[in-house]
Image: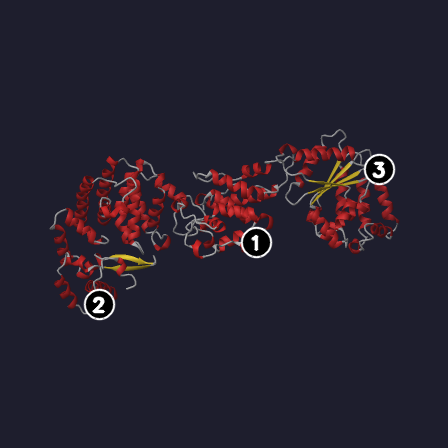
Amino acid sequence: MSGESGPELQGDRPLESSGNDRLGYSHFAENLADTVTSRAPTDGYTIGVYGPWGSGKSTILNFLEDELEDVNSIPAVVRFNPWWFSGRGDLVEKFLTEMGAQLESQDGFPDLRSDLANLSSALSNVPFSAITGVPAEQGFDAIHQLLQQEGESVDELKNSVHEKLEASDRQIICIIDDVDRLTPREITLMFQLIKSIADFPNVIYVLAFEQEVIVNALEKEANFRDGKRYLQKIVQLPLHIPEPKSGSLESLFLDQLPEVPGEQLVDTERWESLLRTGILPLLDTPREVIRLTNTIDVMAASVGEEVNYTDLVGLEALRVFHEEVYAEIKASPERFVGHRKPRLRRSDDPDDYNDILGDLESDRELVENILKELFPMVKDNLLNRSSGFENWDQMRVENRICHRDRISVYFRLNIPDGEISSTEMGAILSKSDDVDFLEAKIREMLDEEGVTGNSKAHTFIKRLGDRTAELQESEYQAIVSAIFATGDELINTAVLNRNKEIYQMSQLIQDILRDVDKEDRTEIISEGIHYGTSPYLASHFVNSLLRQHEEDEGDDVPAGGPLLEMEEIEALKSTVVESINEAAESGSLVDTPQLKEPLKCWRDWGDTEAPQEWVNQGLDEEFDLIEFIDMMSSTTTVNWTRPVFYVDPRWIHEWVDEDYIEKKLNDMNRSSLDEEVNMIIERYETGKQKLKDGQDPSKPGSWVGF
């Protein structure tokens, strides 16, 4: 992660002015303002604005106050939010005190603040805690009786306030928000206040709350059998917040989404399908829009360039609205990544995901749609099919969450250790026409730990193979040369399957060559081999080009036919021989992996005497027989986890007399040799035994499990 600050998150604050309306609420507020100023009774009236949490009730109240400033006879407006005082004392006292303070600054209410303060003081002695326990059938009439028991002072003070407000020719609009955030006891007390204490003339109350919360509180705290019925006694005009105008929440969501990070391209078809069938139907309120876009903002700022934007939005929607589904994806990724193999259709019942989808009720279809858009495995299972045709290398390039190499990135704020980020990959590719830079970068990454135990350089070659479509023609030569410069080192340092590394590099070069005009391909390969110091990779690659012309090697032939003509390959043979000669002269040939192939090419394509002379001189001066046997060995793997070394004794006998080998080995004191030397000797002797038994020790399959 960078140290820079991320984008500013959207605050969950109501809008202040109707001029900023995007959801169509201003018209509702305008009608409400007309109702309270010209159509509501003057002897006290209560209006309820009903809506779920986050639906925009506070915004509508702000719009109402804004509209009230434009009416002919501007009323006095009192704003009171009881939630600010929740748990901090008597709400009755707080309300009357706040009402007096706000009216004092407005025309038409002289001395009213002191009267309200005196009333508040007198009411402080009333045991309102007893009110919440009155039987339901007595209702709010019980409060009047309780007030009368406190003496005439309360009635007198209330009458004084009543008379002054009645004499005033100015209307008071008392706007009360967040009633549904109070405790059940405080909710009950708030409605008792409005009904029985502050039922003043020329005062209209506009309360905003979620109806179900209030009904439940009245039934629980005030012992009303039917809280809805008693709420109707208090609220004379219930108004439900209208649905946001068509398309407004969608527009709000799309406008507040963070930009697509970097140069990532969005699959328009997938994006629109995810929005239409999964995400937009989940967005019922402006608050839900803000919650989701803020969550996406945070994750996009952290790992945005390492993940697929469409998948990130879909996953974060699951986190916000159905966290239990998100948690299961995180805990059991194997249920979601990859695809359903065809053989499973015949033998196993598909995963129906009922453990996470069964309790979703109305949202089940929406969650299913999101999961199917993100994970082909889920789609396969729910439709009982297989999608093995998917291009999984492309999925990896696109950082799709369904790829097992990428899913972990979506659940952390950085990429896995040893992985190459898209940002780093982009930085390297921006200089991929500079061969010196590329070679130095690969060697630098050879010393850095990568994934699956190999170096970061091995990861780079694999990721580069996934992104050949992004390369430019001007970069081809530098990339091919850098691969031939470091190829043998990459093979030597591979932890498990060296053949896999060889294949990836050869395939990468061939993929690049497919985009090059045929007449230019030979020059690119020749220059790359000359620049490099990888005799084995050069020998192996040219041999692979030769196999494309063999009748029984049809599977190795690219769709467009052999990459080079035979005469062009013949010209490359001399280039390979020159590379091997240079390595022999510099002393680096001894470090070449799987030496048997370069030696054979050196002999068959060049001077037939030089390679034998090099072996003879090496056995005398540079390496001993055991080292030579090891250098001529090959490797395979068992289940891609355990390396197996093998050798065909005939590979050695081409260069060293068999009788000489036997005499050397018989003269050795095995008990004094270290374990590694004994293992190499045993490998050679095992190969000889296989020959005697009629097996072919040159085939890896004959060694697996031995």
Numbered label tally: 3
Is 173 or 290 nearer to us in this picture? 290
Left or right placement of residue 23 versus residue 557 in this view? right
Does the CB distance between marks 3 and 1 fall below 8 Å? Answer: no
Residue 230 x %, y %: 78, 48
Q: Which residue is mark 3?
A: 166
> In x, y percent, where is residue 254?
54, 38
Q: Amino acid at mark 1?
A: Gly
Q: Which mark is residue 370?
A: none
Mark 3 Cα shell of 10 Å, populated few (<14), some (14-19), many (≥20): some
Q: CA distance from mark 1 to mark 2?
A: 65 Å
Q: In the structure shown, which secondary structural element does the residue marked by tag 2 occupy?
A: loop
Quadrant hosting residue 347: bottom left
Q: Amino acid at mark 2?
A: Leu
Within 10 Å of disc 1 (Cα), the crowding (few <14, some 14-19, many 20+) is few
Q: Is residue 8 visible?
A: no
Q: Position of residue 670 (x, y in %)?
A: 20, 69
- Disc 1 to disc 2: CB gap under 8 Å: no
Q: What amino acid type is highlighted by mark number 3?
A: Glu
Judged by depth in the image, the label closer to the viewer, 1 or 2, is 1
Q: Which residue is mark 2?
A: 673
State the residue at coordinates (31%, 52%).
500
> In this image, 261 relative to 603: left or right?
right
SS category of the residue bearing label 1: loop
Per the model, the C-alpha gap separating discs 3 and 1 is 60 Å
- Closer to the eye: label 3 or 2: 2
Sequence order check, earlier mark of 1 and 2: 1
Counting residues from the N terminus, which is met first, the one under dot 3 or under dot 1? 3
Whether residue 172 is visible, yes or no, is yes
Q: Is residue 399 left or right of residue 56?
A: left
Q: Which residue is mark 1?
A: 358
